[in-house]
Image (cartoon, rainbow, N blue to C red):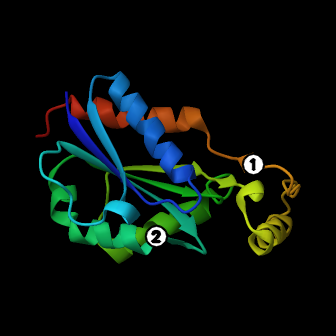
Amino acid sequence: MANIYIAYGTVEGQTGQIAEFIADVARGHGHEVHTVDIKDAGGPLPDGYDAVVVGASVHMGKHEVYIRDFVRNNINVLERIPSAFFSVSLAARGDEENAESYVEKFETETGWRPKHVGLFGGALLYTHYGFIKRHLMQMIARDKESLDTDTSRDYVYTEWDGVRRFAEDFVAGLATPVT
């Protein structure tokens, strides 16, 4: 059984939901898991963890600054113990090349090259947005030729089976001794 730390950054909450889902999968495999929104917690990675998963959402083409800072400040630990990264973006739903470019940019900015990476679709949460953001996101959806422009409802693009596979692959690797 491993003690896993899941650190994430979220703006609208979808990345947090994905982090909690990953935590539930890991707990289902007998692991101890602690999830934390780094924006609230900050600071260095606490001692005593056997593995780390970092998650971040993409807004305006970049992952959260505080997640990039967290990774840079903890890169020695992330390279020493089993670790993984997941990126949440609207691009991950059909524009994989663009979604991958966000991760490449993140890796360049942080210097961390995680062996285990997940790309997950985010959400258009029109009913949670203020007037300006709701209409801005609707314009972006139209520009991308999306049919998801009804602002009276939300659209969740996270493919939960893919999140489950990512989590199960990661925890399966924890049972394998590192050579």
Image position, residue 24 (x, y; %): 41, 31
The quadrant holding residue 135 is: bottom right
Work out how far the residue at label 1 is from the one at label 2, CA to CA, in angstroms: 22 Å
Q: Residues within 10 Å of mark 1 (few under 14, many from 20)?
A: some
Q: Residue at x 50, y 59 (%)?
A: 10
Q: Of 177 and 45, which appears nearest the observer?
A: 45
Q: Residue at x 28, y 23 (%)?
A: 30
The secondary structure type at the circle numbered 1 is: strand
Seen in the image, is 17 located left or right of residue 66? right
Judge whether 29 appears above or below 106 on screen: above
Three-letter code, disc 2: Glu
Image position, residue 17 (x, y; %): 52, 44
Residue on which the image places disc 2: 64
Residue on which the image places disc 1: 155
Image position, residue 94 (x, y; %): 69, 53
Seen in the image, is 165 located left or right of residue 148? left
The quadrant holding residue 77 is: bottom left
Image position, residue 139 (x, y; %): 84, 71
Judge whether 108 appears above or below 16 on screen: below
Q: Residue at x 32, y 73 (%)?
A: 69
The quadrant holding residue 9 is: bottom left
